[in-house]
Amino acid sequence: MKIGIIGANGYGGAELIRLLHQHPKVEIEMLISNSTKGTVLTDQYKHLHNIIEMPLEEWNPNKIQSKLDVLFFATPSGVSKEMLPSLLESEITCIDLSGDFRLKSEGLYEKWYKNKSAHIEDLQKSTYGLTELNRNEIKNSKFIANPGCYPTATLLGLAPVLKANVIDMNSIIIDGKSGVSGAGRKPSVGNLFSEVNENVTAYKLGTHQHIPEIEQEIQNITGISAAVTFTTHLIPMTRGIMCTIYADLKQKVNVEEILELYREAYKDDGFIRIRPKDNWPSTKEVYSTNYCDIGINIEERTGRLTIISVIDNLVKGAAGQAIQNLNVIAGWDERTGLAGIPIYP
Ligand SMILES: NC(=O)C1=CN([C@@H]2O[C@H](COP(=O)(O)OP(=O)(O)OC[C@H]3O[C@@H](n4cnc5c(N)ncnc54)[C@H](OP(=O)(O)O)[C@@H]3O)[C@@H](O)[C@H]2O)C=CC1
Ligand SMILES: CC(=O)N[C@@H](CCC(=O)OP(=O)(O)O)C(=O)O
């Protein structure tokens, strides 16, 4: 398959290039950039010197349609909603890493992203690409809205207890922590070394754009609408997300019973690793990979469940899951191009 990437000089784009380069069934055919079109990739990413020497091209829908089978959008929110609809009548499979087509309501997008939404007909055409939960829909789709990084860790962490109806739906609290690459390569004061180093910062309290995405998908899983408390923190590391999720249990259950629920729910999912009792994952244990590792605790004193879910934001939270979705669509083994071992230490 011939692959193109728009936003190739961003972090999500660079991670797609890294992973697709080692994917045996695809060929990177076209890299598209806005501000750096006309330069070459190695002007932007010197670590790719002598490995991938390709031009950065401008957006040209006719050329894209004649040359590509798949186009990944690794652009900030607000871009794909303008460009992607022109490709929907073509044969091209579009996989969008941004939030433009994840929310199925125009009003919700406009409220949380503070920008005009894509048209409702186009929102309805996209498939939410949380692979482990939506594989059957993804298989028959050619337009994927890849999930946000925090929603990926959160929803994979919560899905088994949501499906089993064992938690109080009004008690869900998610404490999210992200490395700085989650904010992309575009420079900003808040992401300077001197601001981030030796510091932990809470941000976007009650206003984070992933809140409606998490709530929408909780409703899709359970049929029940629930409001969640979701607080995000920026921490001084490059990659990784940890979501610590709290919820009140509706009945008395022990940790082994809950762990069994998780093992059963994810028994066919090679990228989800459920930790044994008293074993909780850390971000480094999934670094550079498409794994999502999940650990569970129950505090008998409070009757509260704690779920620890970790991913690499650039892999399972973005480029890796996008490629996993392509593998599902193409009918290839889901692990194709994604079978690496975490870099450790
Ligand atoms: N970083 C992460 O961990 C995750 C990111 N995402 C999502 O993936 C997307 C990409 O994120 P990320 O790579 O981190 O962001 P970056 O800021 O690193 O890269 C964004 C890219 O989009 C390009 N771009 C910006 N405006 C336009 C435009 N108008 N037309 C064409 N290209 C444009 C940028 O460069 P140029 O203008 O020079 O072409 C750049 O290549 C975002 O929507 C983000 O929310 C999702 C999950 C995790
Ligand atoms: C550390 C950091 O700033 N992370 C970003 C993740 C952005 C993202 O992936 O957002 P969309 O895909 O929904 O556009 C944030 O919390 O907003």
Image: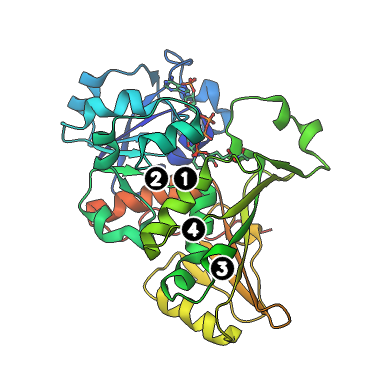
The residue under label 2 is 146
Q: Real-space Cα distance between discs 2 and 1? A: 7 Å
Kind of element beneath mark 1 = helix
Tell us which disc is closer to us: 1 or 4.
4
Quarter the C terminus occupies? bottom right
Kind of element beneath mark 3 = strand
Pointer 1 or 4: first along the chain: 4
Residue 179, position as x, y percentages in the image = 66, 45
The residue under label 4 is 226
Any part of residue 24 in sight? no
Residue 16, position as x, y percentages in the image = 43, 40
What crowding class fits label 2: few (fewer than 14 Cα within 10 Å), some (14-19), or many (20 or more)?
A: many
Q: Is residue 215 left or right of residue 306?
A: left
Q: Amino acid at mark 2?
A: Asn
Pointer 2 or 1: first along the chain: 2
Q: Is mark 1 within 8 Å of ligand 1?
A: yes
Pointer 3 or 2: first along the chain: 2
Q: Real-space Cα distance between discs 3 and 2? A: 21 Å
Residue 289, position as x, y percentages in the image = 52, 55
Q: Is mark 2 within 8 Å of ligand 1?
A: yes
Q: Amino acid at mark 3?
A: Ile
The residue under label 1 is 318
Tell us which disc is closer to us: 2 or 1.
2
Q: Amino acid at mark 1?
A: Ala
What crowding class fits label 3: few (fewer than 14 Cα within 10 Å), some (14-19), or many (20 or more)?
A: many
Q: Real-space Cα distance between discs 1 and 3? A: 18 Å
Quarter the N terminus occupies? top left
Q: Is residue 26 left or right of residue 253?
A: left
Pointer 1 or 3: first along the chain: 3
